Amino acid sequence: MSGLLTTDGVRQLYQDTAADAAIRLQVLGVYRYLADPALKKRLGQHFADARDVFDVLLSDGRHKIKAVLATKCHKLVWTREVTARSLIRVTKFKVFMEDKEYKHRVVLLQDVVVTSLSDDGILPDKVVARRYGSRQADDQLKFISTTHPREVDLLPLVGERLYYLPMRSDHYTLDWACSFTGGQPDEDSPLDELESNWPNRYGMPTAGNEPATSSVAWNIVPDYCSDLFTPECKKLHTILEALDKIKMNNRQGIISNLNPPMLGAIRVKSKVLNLGDPNISNPFPFAFNAVVVDATGVFEVMFFGAMCAKYYLSLHEGDLLSFRGYSSVNPRELQWMATTSPLVSYPNDSSGIVYHVPKKYWKFLELAKIAPRLLADASLSSQQPGSWHLHQLCLSWLECNFVTTLNTQYWGKNAGDLDAMYFDFVGVLSNVGRICRKRKLDEGSSEVTEYRWIKMIDSSSSHELVIKLAEYSQPAVFRSLEAGNTLMITKLQWVILPDKRIQYAKTSTFSVLRMNEAVIPFHSLEECSLNVYFANNVNKNAVLASRKALGESKLSAHIEKKYRPRNRLPTSTEEFKEAFNLDVCSFSDLSMLLQRMEAFEHRHVGFIGHVRAVSNGDDPAQDGPSVLLQLNETTHTDQLLTVAVSINALYQRPAVKGSVKSVTPPKALPLIRLLPTAVVDEMYTKSFNDGPARSTRSKMPTLSLEFVEEYLVSSERGFFFSLQLYRDGIGHVTWEVDAILALP
C-alpha cells in the first residue's frame, strides 16, 4: 500500500502540509463544467480565458477530496491519460483557504504526472486501505471535508454553476444522461463516488442566511389541467386572438401575468441548448424552444434555466398543451425586426405552468376550431403519468414530411432550396459508424459535441441514405444504435457539398430519434406501416457484423451487395481536395496533428507520397487481416507511414473490371479497388506480357499482393492518398487509406 499511494496524501493536500516529495494519489472521477466569473475571480488569471474546468476526485485509499485541475493539465483529460482509476503524482499544487467571502477551501493541482497509463488501457482497481474489522464489500471512502455541498455533491467545486457536463457533449447534463434517458454513467465521471442530498446526509444547515446549494432537478412527469379555464379568464382564445391581446397589454403596460392562456399542440421541439458563457454568470444556462400551433396560428415559446429542466422531458411533439403565466416581450425591445409577434417565454424564475390537456377535452377543442386536426386516436396526454417510457410515445398532432431513398435520387444540382427544407425518414439501419467527439476549436468556440455516420435503407430503392447523426439531447438512443434496428428520424436537412457531387442528410436542431418499439405508435402512417414488413424481411436473413470496441456494425452478405450509397468518391485529385476541403499534410504535419488529436477524435487529411511496401497484417481497426501499405515522401525516404487499406462505407464501392477481378486473389481485391484505373490496367497488361514463360495454360497470371508491391515500388510513381485518422479512448490511432488517386 505504501508504495502505491501516499499515506494521508489527501490530508496533506487539504491542509497544505505536503513535503517536497510528490503525492501519489488515485483518480476516482473527472467532472467537467464551464467556467464563470465567480470561478475566475477566485482562481485568478490562469483561468481568465478558460472555458472548460475539470474537478478531479482524488483518493489516498482512506479519504477522498475534490480538486481543480490547472488549465495546462487539461490535455491529459482530453486525451484520456487522466481518467477514472488512473494513478497520478501531484508535484505542485496551491490551496485557496476559506475567508469571509468563501466558505470552503479549494485545492488547485498545478502539475500532475500520470503513472498508470498502459498500452492496453487496463487501469488498476479502486484502491482501498481497509482497517481491521471493516467489511470486505465496503469500498466507499469518506470525504476529508463536508463543510459545504460543493465539496461532496454533484456540483462544481468552484463558481456558481449548478451542473456537471459529460465529457463528450455540451447538450445535456451529466446526471440527466444517466438518470432519465436509460443511458449508462459516463465512464470517466461516475456518479456513485459523489454524495447527494448533502444537508440530510451530514445534518449541517448552511451557514448564516446562505441558501443550500443544490443541483437543478429534471422532471419527466407531465402536469394535467383539471379545467380549461382559469379564475382570471373564462374564455378560450385562439393563438391569433391571444397574440393580439398580448400586444394590447404590452402597449398599455399591463403585466404579463394577465396575459390569456394559450392552447396549442407542439409541432417541433428543439434539442437542449447550452447558452453557457465563461464570462457571464448563469448557474443553469440551458434552454429549449418549441413551435406551437392551433387551428388558426402559430407561436414560438422558449424555456430557460429551471423551467427548461422542468419541462424538456415532459413536453413532446404532438402534445396538446395549455400555456399559463408565461412572459412576453415586444420584439422591438430586443431590436428584432424579423417579426412583430410577441416573444413568449418562461424565464428561469417563472411561476408559470404548462399543462397537458386531458383527452376528454380534445373533441370539444377540435369542434370549437381551436385545436388543430387530430392525427391519431392516442397520445401521451391521454396516458396516465408513469405509464409511458421516454421516446416510446404516440404523438397525436405530429406533422410529417416523409421521403424515401427513391425521392432523394432526384435531389441533384437544381434541387432548389433544399437547405431550407426539413424532412422525415423511416427505415432500417444498414451501417452504423463509430462515435466521434468534436471540439470546435478552429471555429472560435470550444463547444463539445458527438456525431456518427449511419446508412439506412427502405423498400423504395436499392440506394442507401447516408446521414450524419448528432446526439442532440438523446445520448442513450444515439449510443445504442445497431445495424438491423428500425429507426425513425424527424426534421432532417439535406447537405450539398461545394462541388455538388457529394450529398447527404444531417440531423437538425429539431431532430428526434425513435428506434424499434418507439416507432410502433406511428404505424398508422403509411411509411411506417410499410417499413414493418420491409424490416422483417431484411432481418430474416440478415448477417450482422460488428466491432463492439468501436461501436460499429453493419448488415453484410447479400444486404451489403444489394444496397449502395448514392455518392461516389471523386477520381480527380483537385476535385477530391475541393469536395472535402482537405489539407495535404507532410510527415511533420502529421506528427503535429497526432500531438493535437484528442480521444475519440477523427481527422481526414491528404498525403502525397510513394508506396514502399505492401503486406498482409492484422489491423486493429479491422479486427482481423487487412492489406497494409508502407508510404514515404520523396524528401524523407527514411520515414515510413503504415496505413490499412479500407473501403469507405459512405460511398459507392469502386468498381473493378470483370477481367481484372478474375485474376485478382480475394485478399488483394481491396487494394485493387482503390488504385487508379489506369494503374490497374497497366498492371493487368504487365502480368500477361512480362510473366514467366508458361508451357501450359494451367497457370494463369494473377495480380497478387507480391506482384502489386513489385510494380508499385519499382515504378516510383507518386500518389495522392486520402487518410482517415481516429484516436480511440485508450490513445491508439488507426490509420486508414480509403482512396488512392493519380497525381496530375
Image (cartoon, grey):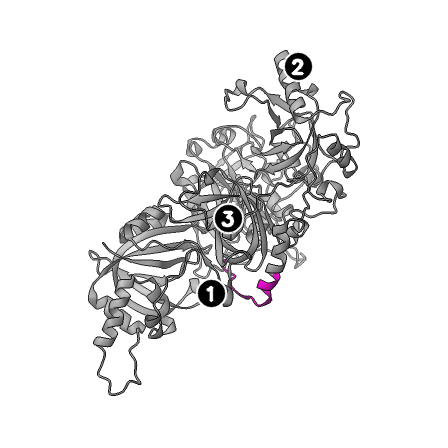
Badge nearest the viewer, 3 or 1:
1
Q: Quadrant of residue 401?
A: top right
Q: Which residue is mark 2?
A: 254
| Horizontal and vertical percent position of residue 229 | 77, 26
Residue at image position (23%, 78%) is 691
Q: Nearer the viewer, residue 32 or 594?
A: 594
Q: Which residue is mark 3?
A: 469
Side of 691 where 644 appears, left or right: right
Side of 469 where 629 appears, left or right: left
Does residue 99 sit above or below 681 in this rendering? above
| Horizontal and vertical percent position of residue 311 | 66, 36
Q: Residues within 10 Å of mark 1 (few under 14, many from 20)?
A: few
- Indicate yes or no whether the magenta region holds residue 541: yes
Q: Secondary structure at mark 2?
A: loop
Specify the amino acid type for callout 3.
Answer: Leu
- Lower position in the chain sequence, tag 3 or tag 2: 2
